[in-house]
């Protein structure tokens, strides 16, 4: 009977665990000192050893070769062998994805008080614990807080944020991290040696990238390669072909074109790959990873590599809905080889936007300036009426406009001047809540096509806008009150 590699080489003791050194160290110490928690919560991505370590705890507390709990199970006694096979009667594994309701939890509560049949403790392993319903969690709360002495709960989950805080607080939590490349490589080499397989060194790196740091996934990928290359050497080329990854040779050739800054040849090479039915988007993602690996090996300048990676993902994200991915590829090549041009274009756009904003601020008629027959004297004569009209709309206009005066008229723009001490009033009048209603009043009283611009008048000798009082004093005078 065929047994999959990840089951065949599932760690049988703590020393065989790949990665998770701190977690292993802490759990071994707690087993050795017999300071076992009544409930554990193991969190982290899939395939990192959460369930495996849960089984090792089960072996540690139930190994018959030792008189007490141990951190070195023998793997020879009946209990250890039964746990390895998954048939130990006192180790109950529950898949919360398919047993997520309150009825399943009630069944646990009904049986939990029964003493272990063959071991020292009963171990309840609840996998994918986040799938339990809220009602099921609530039913589990009291039991999880004060279980019988002979029971240990181990909850495993890939989504800890979905676990109720009341559950988390009752467990000893351990967060599993992705396995490091060297740790994964060491474990895979051990399996390769045991299976008498010949494999290229570069294949380990490809497996690690494909497995995203997951140990179980990396072993599954290795098994797939072994089956496809049965009784053959697993070469880098075969691995890339089997896993559908862009060949290293193609990416090296493409990078050479980019480093030579030859945009025509780079586009030509991209077209060549496209005609070979290469998926353009996947190619550039693989190419970004390739550049990342070259940076880590000091084979590509950091700034150059990061520029390439940044251009790739920025363009892929910006044009993710574009169906013609070859066109997206052209954009990526252009962004990589002409970064200065892109910056210049962006700067011109920004500069243009700033000019537009300034223009609108001075003349909200989108640049259309009209000459209207108005004199400053006419406006000054109507100024009191304008302020009185504004007071009817908002009484605070009176305070803000107390020292404001028509300063000058240029074509269809009326400049209203404030002195330096009235800068707060000027800023207030420029806000939308004041600017728009006041503009309507000015247009009603003076001209329908006039615009207003507020300014600070630096002419200290201009008595029409000079003011000796600060804003607080003006507000106090206006409301005939006292500021406390």
Image (spheres, helix red, strand yellow):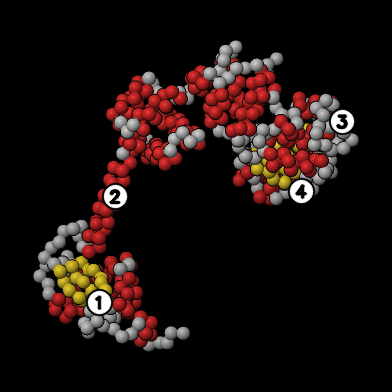
The residue located at (54%, 25%) in the rendering is: 202
Earlier along the polypeptide chain: callout 2 or callout 1? 2
Q: Secondary structure at mark 2?
A: helix
Read off the residue under disc 4. 145
Label 2 to label 1: alpha-carbon separation:
33 Å
Q: Nearer the viewer, residue 126 or 269?
A: 269
The spot of residue 146 in percent (x, y) is: 79, 48
Q: Secondary structure at mark 4?
A: helix
Earlier along the polypeptide chain: callout 3 or callout 2? 3
Other residues around mark 1 within 10 Å, as few (<14) / some (14–19) / many (≥20): few
Q: Is residue 192 visible?
A: yes
Disc ID at residue 65: 3
Disc ID at residue 458: 1
Q: Relative to 44, does residue 396 appear above or below in the rendering?
A: below
Label 3 to label 4: alpha-carbon separation:
31 Å
Other residues around mark 4 within 10 Å, as few (<14) / some (14–19) / many (≥20): some
């Amino acid at each position: 009977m065929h047994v999959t590699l990840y089951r065949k080489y599932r760690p049988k003791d703590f020393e065989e665990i790949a990665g998770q050194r701190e977690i292993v160290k802490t759990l071994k110490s707690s087993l050795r000192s017999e300071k076992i928690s009544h409930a554990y919560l193991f969190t982290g991505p899939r395939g990192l050893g959460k369930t495996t370590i849960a089984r090792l705890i089960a072996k540690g507390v139930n190994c018959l070769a030792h008189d007490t709990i141990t951190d070195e199970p023998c793997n020879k006694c009946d209990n250890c062998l039964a746990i390895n096979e998954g048939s130990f009667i006192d180790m109950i594994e529950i898949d919360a994805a398919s047993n997520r309701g309150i009825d399943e939890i009630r069944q646990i509560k009904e049986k939990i008080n029964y003493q272990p049949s063959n071991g020292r403790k009963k171990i309840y392993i609840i996998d994918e614990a986040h799938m339990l319903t809220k009602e099921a969690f609530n039913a589990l709360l009291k039991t999880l807080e004060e279980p019988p002495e002979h029971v240990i709960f181990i909850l495993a989950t890939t989504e800890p944020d979905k676990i109720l805080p009341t559950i988390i607080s009752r467990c000893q939590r351990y967060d599993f991290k992705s396995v490091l490349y060297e740790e994964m490589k060491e474990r895979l080499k051990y399996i390769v040696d045991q299976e008498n397989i010949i494999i290229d060194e570069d294949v380990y790196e490809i497996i690690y990238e494909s497995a995203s740091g997951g140990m179980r996934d990396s072993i599954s990928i290795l098994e797939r390669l072994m089956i496809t290359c049965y009784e053959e050497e697993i070469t880098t080329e075969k691995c890339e072909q089997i896993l559908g990854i862009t060949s290293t040779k193609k990416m090296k050739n493409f990078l050479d074109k980019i480093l030579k800054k030859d945009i025509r040849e780079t586009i030509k090479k991209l077209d060549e790959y496209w005609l070979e039915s290469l998926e353009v988007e996947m190619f550039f993602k693989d190419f970004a990873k390739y550049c990342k690996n070259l940076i880590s090996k000091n084979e590509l300048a950091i700034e150059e590599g990061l520029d390439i990676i940044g251009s790739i993902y920025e363009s892929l994200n910006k044009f993710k809905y574009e169906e013609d991915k070859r066109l997206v590829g052209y954009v990526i090549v252009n962004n990589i080889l002409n970064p200065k041009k892109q910056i210049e274009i962006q700067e011109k756009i920004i500069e243009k936007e700033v000019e537009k904003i300034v223009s609108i601020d001075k003349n909200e008629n989108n640049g259309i300036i009209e000459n209207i027959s108005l004199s400053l004297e006419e406006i000054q004569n109507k100024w009191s009426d304008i302020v009185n009209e504004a007071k009817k709309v908002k009484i605070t206009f009176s305070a803000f406009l107390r020292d404001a005066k028509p300063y000058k008229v240029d074509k269809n723009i009326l400049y209203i001047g404030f002195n330096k001490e009235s800068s707060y009033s000027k800023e207030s009048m420029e806000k939308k809540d004041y600017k728009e209603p006041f503009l309507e009043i000015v247009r009603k009283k003076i001209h329908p096509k006039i615009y207003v611009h507020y300014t600070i008048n630096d002419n200290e000798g201009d008595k029409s806008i000079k003011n000796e009082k600060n804003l607080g004093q003006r507000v106090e005078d206006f409301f005939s009150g006292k500021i406390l």
